[in-house]
Image: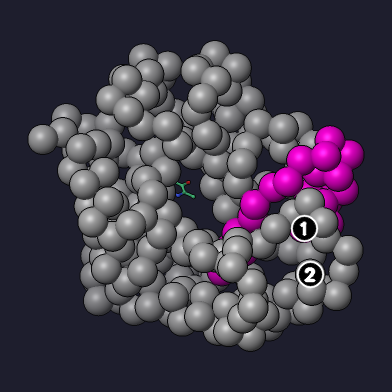
């Protein structure tokens, strides 16, 4: 069984979707996964995503999984169905503005900061609730918050990784119960990469973002 088949099988067992992370990969490598049946791909950089979209089959669904600057929202929005990396009200507002201009509905995830490391990205718990208060009070018609995204620490300590995924799942439940209790759309938990996707699936991931593992044979 190829790695792609194995990851795909694990995802099915957990009713999760596989986002094949194609950053830095060549067109033939991506086409190869496409030919096996993969249709959902993720890129972490806007420029690279834009270069790839137009040269690959049109029925690929693209997700932006990496940091997004507000000045690039306009360019990337027409090409993607989901943005995993919303971490400020300002970005959320810019996505709404640009989406309403082109009359497109767009799904987004709130990126949470849980890792031990001092990474620059992701919302703290306080920022998360402030953003949600704004979202529910404001005029957001095109942008729909459908879940959360997070990354575990880069560590060999798999118990720590598991604990961090539990923290993400806990925050998901907290947001769902506190803000989306009567709404169906809040369902997604984006967590898990090549080294830890199986743990992520066990801890409730609905979208795993796996790159390097899929391209090894
Ligand atoms: C690169 C990347 C991944 C995939 O990482 P791998 O270790 O190659 O599976 C997942 N999420 C984000 C945000 C990434 O940038």
Residue at 36 percent of width and 14 percent of height: 28
Q: Which residues are magenta?
A: 91-112
Image-based side of 145 in relation to 114, left or right: right
Residue 102 is one of the magenta-drawn residues: yes
Q: Can residue 180 be seen in the rendering of this structure?
A: yes
Q: CA distance from mark 1 to mark 2?
A: 8 Å
Crowd tier of the residue under label 2, counting other residues whose Cα lies within 10 Å: few below 14, some 14–19, many 20 or above: some
Image-based side of 90 in relation to 190, left or right: right
Q: Which mark is residue 135?
A: 2
Q: Pointers 1 and 2 in contact (CB under 8 A)?
A: yes
Q: Position of residue 1 (x, y in %)?
A: 10, 35
Residue at 59 percent of width and 68 percent of height: 184
Tell me the element at label 1: helix
Crowd tier of the residue under label 1, counting other residues whose Cα lies within 10 Å: few below 14, some 14–19, many 20 or above: many
Q: Position of residue 83 (x, y in %)?
A: 62, 49
Q: Is residue 118 above or below residue 217?
A: below
Q: Which residue is mark 1?
A: 92
Quadrant housing the C terminus: top left
Residue 100 is one of the magenta-drawn residues: yes
């Amino acid at each position: 069984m190829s790695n792609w088949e194995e990851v795909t099988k694990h995802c099915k067992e957990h009713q999760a979707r596989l986002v094949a992370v194609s950053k830095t990969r060549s067109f033939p490598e991506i086409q190869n996964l496409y030919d096996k049946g993969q249709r959902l791909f993720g890129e972490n950089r806007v420029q690279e995503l834009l270069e790839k979209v137009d040269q690959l089959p049109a029925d690929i669904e693209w997700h932006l999984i990496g940091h997004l600057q507000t000045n690039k929202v306009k360019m990337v929005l027409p090409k993607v169905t989901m943005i995993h990396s919303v971490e400020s009200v300002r970005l959320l507002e810019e996505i709404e503005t640009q989406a309403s201009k082109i009359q497109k509905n767009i799904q987004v995830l709130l990126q949470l900061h849980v890792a031990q490391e001092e990474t620059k990205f992701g919302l703290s718990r306080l920022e998360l609730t402030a953003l949600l208060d704004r979202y529910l009070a404001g005029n957001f018609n095109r942008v729909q918050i459908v879940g959360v995204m997070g990354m575990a620490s880069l560590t060999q300590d798999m118990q720590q990784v598991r604990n961090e995924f539990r923290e993400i799942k806990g925050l998901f439940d907290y947001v769902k119960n506190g803000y989306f209790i009567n709404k169906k759309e809040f369902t997604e938990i984006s967590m898990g990469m090549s080294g830890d996707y199986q743990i992520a699936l066990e801890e409730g991931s609905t979208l795993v973002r796996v790159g390097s593992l899929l391209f090894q044979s």
